[in-house]
Every structure is written in structure tokens, then in C-alpha cells.
Amino acid sequence: MPPPPRLPSLAVLPLPNRGLGVIARTPIPRGTRIFSEHPLLALRHDQDASDVYAASRLLTQEQRAVLMGLSGNGAESSLEGVGGRERRAWRWLHVGPRLGTKTELMRLWKFPTVRRLKRHMAVLSIFRSNAFDLGNAATWQQAVFPTISRLNHACVPNAQGNFHEGTGKFNVHTIRDVQEGEEVTLNYLQEVGMVRNARREKLSKGYGFECGCPACDLGMERGRVGEKRRVEMQRTLGEYARGVGEGQPGGVGEKEKELRTFEAFIEMFEGEGIAGRELAAMYFESSRLHKALGNHDEALRCADKGLFIDEDCLGTDHAIYQTGRETVEALRSLAVSEGPLRAVAAG
Ligand SMILES: C[S@@+](CC[C@H](N)C(=O)[O-])C[C@H]1O[C@@H](n2cnc3c(N)ncnc32)[C@H](O)[C@@H]1O
């Protein structure tokens, strides 16, 4: 059985077509830290998928039991990023021993027993199905968690996970109010406004499933409207990318174009109901550009908005939140010190 969730208001339950998932037993307000876990198995930046099995062998028996209890789809896509040895061995197991005799398998691919080979493949599959990217974490790139790895994906989720360098824990916060009985979900992909096909391809390749979340359902109004917004966003982004370098580098025109692109992202994210770090980052980028363009009130308004979002998705103990608060304070003191000058200019 999976370890119990941190909050009694959450339950890990079987769900249709997606294995186990996490359900809210009571309403949970936006900004609640619902999980805070150390990784069970993690890959450093200098490691790759070929190191997963060796890392799993360092776990205690109890930890290994939790790891092996996580879901793994066993698909060949689990071998993304691993070497030819594992790939050939996977085929040997799945296509059949006609690809080589057992002795050849042991000699060429250096698996001491078929049992060890099967365990190796199972660990790779579990890792691939459950590992989350840790964003900009200095040491770690991807990790699997005892309970957080029970959270299913939605393209517009109601929770977000962020790694806290100081504590070495992955914290999950609700990023909007969650109703009783609602599933708690994370976005497994980085939110960059991808259209449905691009998201589906990444999810299928990375996690081996076809997303059927409301944002992906083009049979429904909600899915169609969202897709239209994303297509429009990609068009804006394309136009911006094509125009980069046409104006004077760092000039006002360039900054205004950049600002309009961030504003388009904000409009798309908010229209879709996307909250979390990505939205906060767009507000902070807009704030930076407003400041550079001399729009101090707007710079402060955007930074304030970014900070409000960061408080909910990261918590006040996160370094990114604290940097954001310093930005807001600096902009506020600038507004105070410039106040009388503005009044004179206006008068
Ligand atoms: C991190 S695990 C999530 C917990 C998992 N459902 C379990 O039973 O332990 C990821 C796996 O859950 C399934 N999954 C997650 N989100 C899904 C979704 N939106 N639709 C279908 N399957 C999903 C896929 O099999 C995926 O590889």
C-alpha cells in the first residue's frame, strides 16, 4: 500500500483509466501545502537514465518496497535515455528469446540472472512513469517520491510541486481551491503554452499515457476554446521570435514587443485557469520590462501579482518567494522616493 498522504483530508484511491490517484476528502483552499517529501530515488544532473538501477540498489529494503509498489507501464518508452544494452535486453524479454539465447544475454549484456534483468527493467519503467523534473534544482534533475508520485497529470492542474533547495524536499501546493471529492493533479510538463498534440506526444513518450483531461478534450467547448487560445499564443510567440533582432537591441521597441509577448502569455494562462510558478514568472518579467520602460506603477502592480501567486505555489519559506518579495519592496520604495517628483512633474 502507498504511504498515507500527509493530510488526512487526502486519500489515495483507484480511479478510472489512470490507476491510483489522490482525492480531496474535504475542500482544500488555494495555497495549502499538501505534501512535503524527500525524494525516494533521484538522479543528479551528472547522471542519466542508465544510472537509475544502480541508484535503486542503494535504497533500504523498506524504501525499495515502496519504490517497487509504484506504478510502471513496462512500455519500451520507459527506456527513453538508457543505453543499447538495456534496449536489447528489453526486446529479449518482450519479443522473445529468439533474439538470442539466455547465455548470450548473460555474456553480452552482463545481466547475471533473468530475475535481475526483469527487476532492472521494472525499476526503469517505474522511474520513467513516476519521476518529476525538479526544475532549476542545483543538484537534482529528476526524482520519484513515495506519495507525491501518486498524483496524476492534468494539463490545467489544481496543484503544483516545487523543489525546496534548503530542505531538500519537494513541496506540493494547491494553486486553486479544490472541492471535496475532486482529484488533485499536477502538470507533468513544463507549462509553455504547448498545443494539444505537442503535449500528448510528450506525455506519451515520457510517461506512456494518452491524456484525456478536460483541456485535451476537443469534443467539449472547454477543450476547443483552450486549444484556440494556445494556437493564438504560439502564433504570437512565433511572430515575436521572427521579429527578434529587427529593432535596435535593447531599445524601447524591442522591450515593448517583449512585454506584449509576456502579456499574451498572461492572458492565455489566466484564460485557461493556469496558475503557479509559470504565471508568476510572466508577471515578474512584465514587471522588469515595465520598470525598464519607466512605468513604475505597472512594474509594482505586476511584481505584486507575481508575489501573490508565488506565495500560494511556493510558500513564504522558498528562496524564489523571498527574492520576489525583495523585488516588490525595492519597487515600492522607488515609488515612495519618486512620488513627490512625479507630483511636481504632473503639477
Ligand atoms: C506519477 S504516476 C501517477 C500515479 C499512478 N496513477 C499510480 O497508479 O500510481 C504516473 C502514471 O499515472 C498514469 N496517469 C497519470 N496521469 C494520467 C492521466 N491524466 N490519464 C491517464 N493516465 C494517467 C500514467 O500511467 C502515468 O504513467
Image: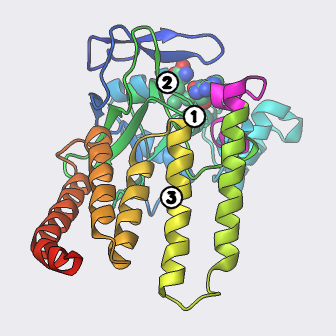
Q: Give the mark nearest the N terminus, 3 or 2.
A: 2
Picture residue at 34% right of the left edge, 17% below the top: 3
Disc 1 to disc 3: CB gap under 8 Å: no
Residue lying at 73% horizontally and 33% vertically, measured from the top left: 224
Chain part drawn in magenta: 200-223
Task: State if disc 1 and disc 2 touch (CB < 8 Å).
Answer: yes
Pick whichever, 295 or 149, lies toward us. 295
Q: Position of residue 164 (x, y in %)?
A: 26, 48
Tell me if 344 is positioned left or right of 62 in this view: left
Residue 184 placement (x, y as % from top left): 44, 22
Q: Is mark 2 within 8 Å of ligand 1?
A: yes
21 over 135 or under it: above or below:
above
Asked which quadrant contains residue 240, the reply is bottom right
Cα distance, mark 1 to mark 3? 34 Å
Number of callouts: 3
> Mark 1 sits on what residue?
129
Residue 263's label in the rendered image is 3
- For residue 70, the mark is 2
| Image disc number at residue 180 | none
Residue 89 horizontal/vertical position (percent): 72, 42
Give the structural element (helix, strand or loop) at label 3.
helix
Query: Is residue 74 visible to us here?
Result: no
Tag nearer the camera, 3 or 2: 3
Give the image quarter of residue 120. Answer: top right
Kindly identify the amino acid type of the residue bearing the numbered disc 3.
Glu
